[in-house]
Image: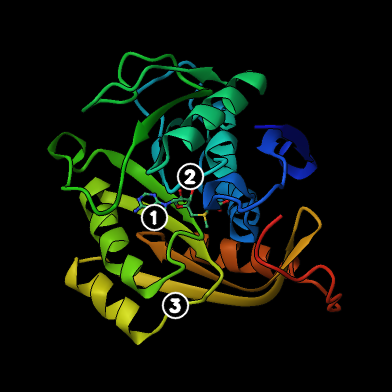
Amino acid sequence: MAFETLVIESNNISLSVPQPSGERQLWSRLWGAGLILADLVPLVVPSAQSHPGSSDSVQRVIELGSGLALPSLVAARLGAHVTMTDASAESLALAELNAKSNSIQVYPSNPGDPASDKPAGECVCTRKLNWYDPLEAELASTYDLVLGSDIMYMNRLLRPVARQVRHLLKSDGKALLVDAGRCFGEDFLEICEEYGLKVSLIEQANVRASGFVLKKAVVMLVGFDDDTRQRITDKLRSMSAPSADPEQFGYCL
Ligand SMILES: C[S@@+](CC[C@H](N)C(=O)[O-])C[C@H]1O[C@@H](n2cnc3c(N)ncnc32)[C@H](O)[C@@H]1O
């Protein structure tokens, strides 16, 4: 497979991505929702400066369907312990390489406690996690924050994703998911309610991130307070593209 390098300046991260050729796998592209999520992550992951030298207050973060895993790398840079997950082993191998090339430490997956005995800051691990597989008991109520972008692109994915989010989150955990709004509707909120997830949605048209414009961004929030919700709303507004350049609209790079 041939690769090219994409530099994501706003996140100060460069990514090796498979060169476009033939039919491309979903994981091998950088999706607009992922670029937006990467820009929102600093609003919800406290930076390492706010917990110097302490591993107690380090956030445990998991990204679902991480693909090229840009939001995970941004969260790790801020000092979180991040588990990048996908159904595709190839995507996880590339996410590890990209972490290393951005000087982020990679730890072997450690079931049950993916971030224990790690120093604070800048570390990731990978774990194969398919939303349709049985829930993994050792990951129950483990994470402070679940991230995901463009992982609910078909109606049939809403339920398995909601089920995973509920399973993985600590009781006071939070989730931040960004989507292109293909499938969100009343049924999604009902499904979340079934799983005990109190969801709030923010919708914003024409959101620009890293030079790319997504026609519609739907941000799903679980567990955040009103102040954080307002900061996220303000940030999305500040990212809104003033005029529509049809060439820029699309789902992915
Ligand atoms: C549209 S891509 C989004 C990738 C990345 N989150 C982004 O925003 O750039 C969907 C991702 O979900 C993963 N995926 C699809 N079905 C999955 C499943 N059943 N379990 C886990 N991951 C899955 C794909 O491998 C791919 O990485």
Asked if residue 102 is positioned above or below residue 82 in the image, the reply reads: above
Is residue 107 in view? yes
| Three-letter code, disc 3 | Cys
Per the rendering, the mark at residue 183 is 3
Q: Please rate how many residues cluster around mark 2, counting C-alpha atoms within 10 Å: few if below 14, some from 14 to 19, many from 20.
A: many
Q: Give the residue drawn at x 55%, y 67%.
A: 230
Per the rendering, the mark at residue 225 is none
Residue at the farthest bottom position: 186
Callout 3–callout 2 Cβ contact below 8 Å: no
Tag in front: 1 or 2: 2
Q: Give the residue drawn at x 34%, y 42%.
A: 144
Residue 24 percent location from the top left of the image: 60, 51
Task: Count how many numbered circles sit on residues in the image.
Answer: 3
Say what secondary structure mark 3 lies in: loop
Choose the circle earlier in sequence order: 1 or 2.
2
Residue at the farthest left position: 137
Residue holding disc 1: 175
Q: Real-space Cα distance between discs 3 and 2?
A: 19 Å
Q: Please rate how many residues cluster around mark 3, counting C-alpha atoms within 10 Å: few if below 14, some from 14 to 19, many from 20.
A: some
Beta carbon of the mark 2 residue lies under 8 A of ligand 1: yes
Q: Real-space Cα distance between discs 3 and 1?
A: 18 Å
Viewer-proximal residue, 60 or 95? 95
Residue holding disc 2: 66
